[in-house]
Image (cartoon, rainbow, N blue to C red):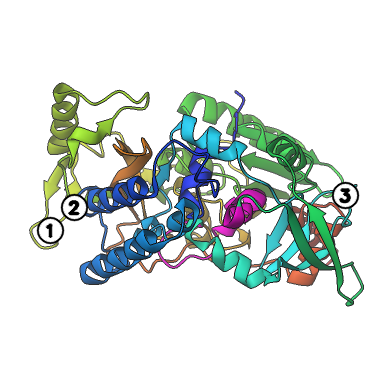
Amino acid sequence: MKLRLKTGIAAILLSSGLTAAAQDHAFTGFTKEDLVADFRLAMDILKAQHPHPYKFIDSATYTRKVDSLLKLMSGAADVAGCSRYSPIQLVRDVHTSIAYSDDNGRELYSRINFLPFPVIVERGKMLVNIKGETIPFGAEIVSINQMPVNEMLDAIASSVYSDGNIQTGIDRVYADFPLRFSMLNATRKTFDVAYRLPGNNSIRNITLPYATPQKAFQSKSQAVLPCNLLQRSYFIYRDYDNASGTGILTVNSFNLQEPYAYKEFSEFFKEVNKRRYKHVIIDIRNNGGGNPAISALLYSFLSAKPFRNEYNYRTKTTQIAYSEYAIDDYGRKLSENDINNTVNFLYQRFDKDSATGFYVGNARLKEGQLENFPPDKNAFSGDVYVLTGGGTVSAATYFASLVQKNKRGTIIGKETGSGEQATTAAWFLKYMLPKTKSVLTVPMSELYFFNATTDSGRGVIPDKEVPLPQFISFAREGQDPELSYALEVIKKGDAK
C-alpha cells in the first residue's frame, strides 16, 4: 500500500505569506484588491467556523491584528508585498490552511526566479543540501542578498504553521525554502550568497544566477537529505539491523484502515521477536496523523498491560457558517442537502456543555472507541525509541505522548508539530473564496487527549535531542541525523 507524497505548489504559494507574482503586469488571475478582500473573508470565516479561534489569541487582539495586517496589505506596492502580511497564522493551528487554485498556483510558480540550491535548516543554521553545485554540499549559508539567516527565517515565518507556541514547523517547510525565499523578490536575476566551508570560519561570497522552475524542481529532487526517501514513500516501511539487534519501523501516516495497519505492525513485531532483537526504533517524523485509534493500535504492540486510550472532540459551533462558499473535495458547491446532512451529523454526536460553552462529543461519537486497550499478543518487551519532529502531527503526536506518558520509551528528535494535550482534527470544511478562487480549509473540531481540559500550546518534548554539532556532522556525512544518533545511543547502552 504505497503512499504517494506530492508537493502542493498552490498551497505553498499562498500559505507562505510571500505568495504572488511580483510581475503584476503579467499575472491576470486576480488583483491585489481581490486578495485583500479574500483574506478579509477568510478571517471572518475562521472567526465563525473554527472550533476554537481564540485559544491562543483573544478576540480583541485577533481583530486588531487582522485589521493591521490587512491595512499593510492595502498599502503594499504589489501583490507580492500584499501577501507577505497573511493573517492566517494568527489562529496558530497546524490544520488550518489556504491554497491558490491550481490554475493560479501553476501560473505563479512558472513566473518565479528561484534560489538555485536546496537547503537544510536546523536550529537557526542553514546548510547547502545538494552535491555537485557551485557551493559545496554542507557549506553553511551566512546570508543571501545581504539578509542573515535569522532574518530569512523570520521572513517566511507566516508559512510555518504549528499549534500554539510550537516553533518546529520549519521541519515541514525547509525543503521548499527556495520557493518561499524566492517569493520575496520573484523577478530577481541573481542571488548574492555568503557562506562558510566546513571546518573553515572564513566567509566566502559568490553571486549565482537564478534557477528556472524546472531546474529548481530538479534540484529539490537531488537533495541529499532526507536520505530515507524509500522509507518515506510508503505508509509503513520495515527495516531490520542485525548488527545492532534493532528493528526500525517507519510510519508515515495513521490515516489507515485497521486491517492493513494491523497486518503491517504484527508482521514487523513478529519478526523482531523472532530475531530476538533488543531494540526498536519507530520513526514518525514525517507522520501527518490520521486516526488516533491506529496510534493506540501501534502502541498496543509496545505495552505489557492494558492502557488508557482516552480522547474526545469538542467545538464552539455545530453549524456551517458562510455556507454559500462551502465546497466539497472536488470543488463542487455544497448543496442544501449536503449542509443539512453535516449539521445533523454534528447535532447527533455533540452535546452542549453549559459550563464551558463548547459542544462535546457524546457516546454516539465515541462509539467503538476502546478506552481500556489491551496489549497485543505479539507485543515487544525490549527498548523503544521514537523519532519525532515538527512533521509529527495530530494522531502521530498522540502516539508519541502514549509512549512518553506510559514511560515506555525514549523520544528522540524535536518537539512535535501539534499539541500534546490537544489539536484540531476530525472533519474538515473547504471554502472557495470568490475573488481569487483560493480554498480555505478549516477543521470542524478540536481533539483533546487523555481527557485534558487545558492546552499549554506545546507539543511532546523529546527526551533527547541530537546535539547541534553532531547533527551538522551527520548531515554533512549524508547520514540521517536522528536515526544515526538513536543507533549511537543504543550502541552505548549495549556497551555498558
Say which element carries label 3: loop
Residue 355, image x, y percentages: 10, 63
Which amino acid type is marked by label 1?
Gly
Quadrant of residue 455 in the image? bottom left
Tell me what residue is drawn at x 46 percent, y 27 percent.
Answer: 257
Say which element carries label 1: loop
Residue position for label 3: 133
Which amino acid type is marked by label 3?
Glu
The stretch in magenta equals: 160-185
Quadrant of residue 432 in the image? top left
Q: Give the camera-side residue of 44 and 29.
A: 29
Per the rendering, the mark at residue 252 is none
Tell me what residue is drawn at x 50 percent, y 49 percent.
Answer: 19
Query: On the rendered structure, is 245 left or right of 351?
Result: right
Which amino acid type is marked by label 2?
Lys
Per the rendering, the mark at residue 316 is 2
Residue 226, image x, y percentages: 73, 47
Per the rendering, the mark at residue 357 is 1
Residue 173, image x, y percentages: 59, 52
In the image, residue 374 sits, relative to residue 193, either above or below, namely above
Query: On the rendered structure, is 380 left or right of 398?
Result: right
Say which element carries label 2: loop
Query: On the rendered structure, is 27 left or right of 387?
Result: left
Is tag 1's residue or tag 2's residue first in the polypeptide sequence? 2
How far separated are the C-alphas under marks 3 and 2?
Answer: 52 Å
Front tag of 1 and 3: 3
Check the picture and name the quadrant holding the N terminus: top right
